[in-house]
Amino acid sequence: MEARINQVGILTARFDEMVTFYRDVLGFKVKFQLDGHAEFESPGVRFAISTLEIMANITDHPSF
């Protein structure tokens, strides 16, 4: 079996700045965006940016 990466997630305390950078500077199109979470169009891999708080809530792990 070949190892493959199918999702890349970035956790950040600077969510708005990161979304602006990936959208406006690098040219990624936003697939959808909610408060503290955005996913971008990227063929072959799911690419997302989330706040530390969102990930802490999703995983129920306070150390994020």
Image (cartoon, rainbow, N blue to C red):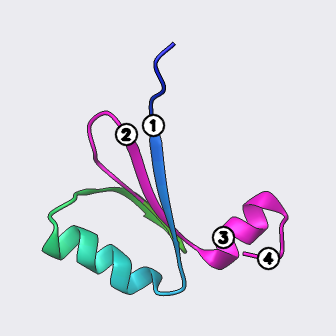
N-term-proximal mark, 3 vs 4: 3
Q: Secondary structure at mark 1?
A: loop
State if disc 1 and disc 2 touch (CB < 8 Å).
yes
Horizontal arrangement in the rendering, residue 37 relative to residue 29 (left or right): right
x 28%, y 45%: residue? 42
N-term-proximal mark, 4 vs 1: 1
Label 4 to label 1, Cα distance in Å? 25 Å
Pointer 2: what residue?
A: 45
Q: Which residues are magenta?
A: 39-64
Pointer 4: what residue?
A: 63
Amino acid at circle 1: Ile
Pointer 3: what residue?
A: 54
**Callout in the foreground (3, 2):** 2
Q: Is residue 33 above or below residue 13?
A: above
Q: Is residue 63 magenta?
A: yes
N-term-proximal mark, 2 vs 1: 1
Q: Residues within 10 Å of mark 1 (few under 14, many from 20)?
A: few
Q: Position of residue 18 (x, y in %)?
A: 36, 78
Q: Quadrant of residue 56?
A: bottom right
